[in-house]
Amino acid sequence: MPVPAKRRPTSEARRGRSHQALKKVAVNTCPKCGKPVLPHTACKFCGNYKGKQVLKLDAPKIKK
């Protein structure tokens, strides 16, 4: 198996990895309940998406 003819400089190796950094996650708020929601997903708390009820969720349980 072939090997590299010369060693890559450290700066060149780091520049090659520059695109692998983690991106910030955009978080929106649900217009109905105000909880944080990822974009283009239904709210896990109330089940709404774009103003419509898309998930049938039970009422949240309250601890006694």
Image: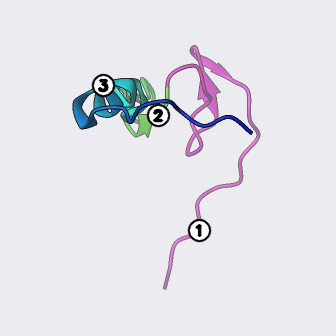
| Residue that badge 2 annotates | 37
- The span from disc 2 to disc 3 (Cα, nearest Å) is 34 Å
Counting from the top left corner in percent of width and height, residue 2 is at: 68, 34
* Image-based side of 22 in relation to 52, left or right: left
Secondary structure type for disc 1: loop
Residue tagged 1: 61
The secondary structure that dominates the magenta segment is: loop
The magenta-colored residue range is 39-64
Residue drawn 60% across the image and 27% down it: 41
Residue 44 located within the stretch drawn in magenta: yes
Q: Which of 8 and 16 is in front in this view?
A: 8
Q: Can the viewer see residue 24 in this picture? A: no
Q: Percent position (x, y) of residue 5? A: 49, 30
Query: Looking at numbered disc 2 in the image, what kind of residue is underneath it?
Result: Val
Q: Residue furthest left?
A: 11
Quarter of the image where one finds residue 21: top left
- Please tell me which of labels 2 and 3 falls first in the chain: 3
Query: Is tag 2's residue or tag 1's residue first in the polypeptide sequence?
Result: 2
Dot 3 amino acid type: Arg
Q: SS of the residue at dot 3? A: helix
Cα–Cα span, label 2 and label 1: 20 Å
Alpha carbon separation for disc pair 3 and 1: 51 Å
Q: Which residue lies furthest to the top in this view?
A: 50
Q: Mark 3 points at which residue?
A: 15
